[in-house]
Amino acid sequence: MLAEDLHLLREGLVALLRAHGFEVVAAVESGPELLAALVGERPDVAVVDVRLPPTFTDEGLQAALAARRQVPGLPVLVLSQHVEQLYARELLADGSGGVGYLLKDRVFNGEQFVDAVRRVAAGGTAMDPEVIARLLASNARNEPLGRLTPREREVLELMAEGRSNAAIGQRLFLSDSAVGKHTASIFTKLGLAPSDDDNRRVLAVLAFLNSK
């Protein structure tokens, strides 16, 4: 399911998704249409813009949150030009189902977008690094986050993007054991129980950020 108010972009996304084997069950342009379609259709994944008619503020995110309260675990990928921190935290930290947040001007090709859609549909996460950086920056003065080293903050940002320890190691040129040590230290400093489940650990970190 797709929610986007700009006609050409909406039709372009529909064509892209269909070209990669997706069935688009609905393509809507307003918040009320989105909520009704999400609850009625219960899609495998929804791609949602933040600012939709009638007020062009945060209807998309609010509709997604309302739908997830009625359909727990409904996978939602936000695709927007804006980072709405308050509702983004609530969406990302409710701990159920796949979630993602991409910025339109930072999606550089169709494969990147389609990969994110598939990841969220499978119950994983797909987070733009800029979104994670802004969420972390808004919590920079929190005492637990302040205890993290610069390297641990880098690892945390990559964890929140949904990356595995192996992927983090490749990005930061660290061994698997080094990434494991940083991860364990992060969980200890944030008061979180370690987990081998990448999605659960990301949501746990985001839930912590949301609580502050």
Image (cartoon, rainbow, N blue to C red):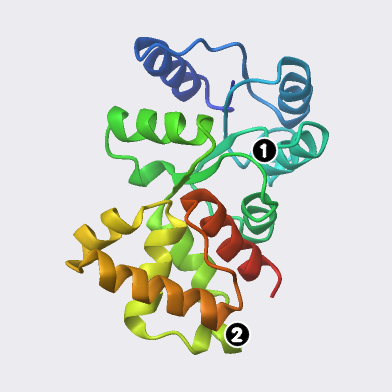
- Counting residues from the start of the chain, the first of labels 1 and 2 encountered is 1
Between residue 148 and residue 51, name the one nearer to us. Answer: 148
Which residue is disc 1 drawn over?
A: 60
Location of the C terminus (image quadrant): bottom right
Query: Does 102 sit left or right of 37 as displayed?
Result: left
Instruction: Answer with the quarter of the image where residue 109 lies.
Output: top left
- Helix, strand, or loop for circle 1? helix
Cα separation between marks 1 and 2: 29 Å
Q: Is residue 73 above or below residue 192?
A: above
Give, as a three-letter code, the residue at label 2. Asn
Q: Residues within 10 Å of mark 2 (few under 14, many from 20)?
A: few
Q: Position of residue 175 (x, y in %)?
A: 20, 67
Q: Position of residue 51 (x, y in %)?
A: 63, 41
Which residue is found at the position 68% from the left and 60% from the top?
86
Q: Residue furthest left?
A: 173
Which residue is disc 2 drawn over?
A: 142
Which residue is found at the position 17% from the left and 67% from the top?
173
Residue 56 appears in the rendering: yes
Query: Does 65 sit left or right of 203 as displayed?
Result: right
Residue 154 appears in the rendering: no
Which residue is found at the position 24% from the left and 62% from the top?
169
Q: Is residue 140 above or below residue 39?
A: below
- Helix, strand, or loop for circle 2? loop
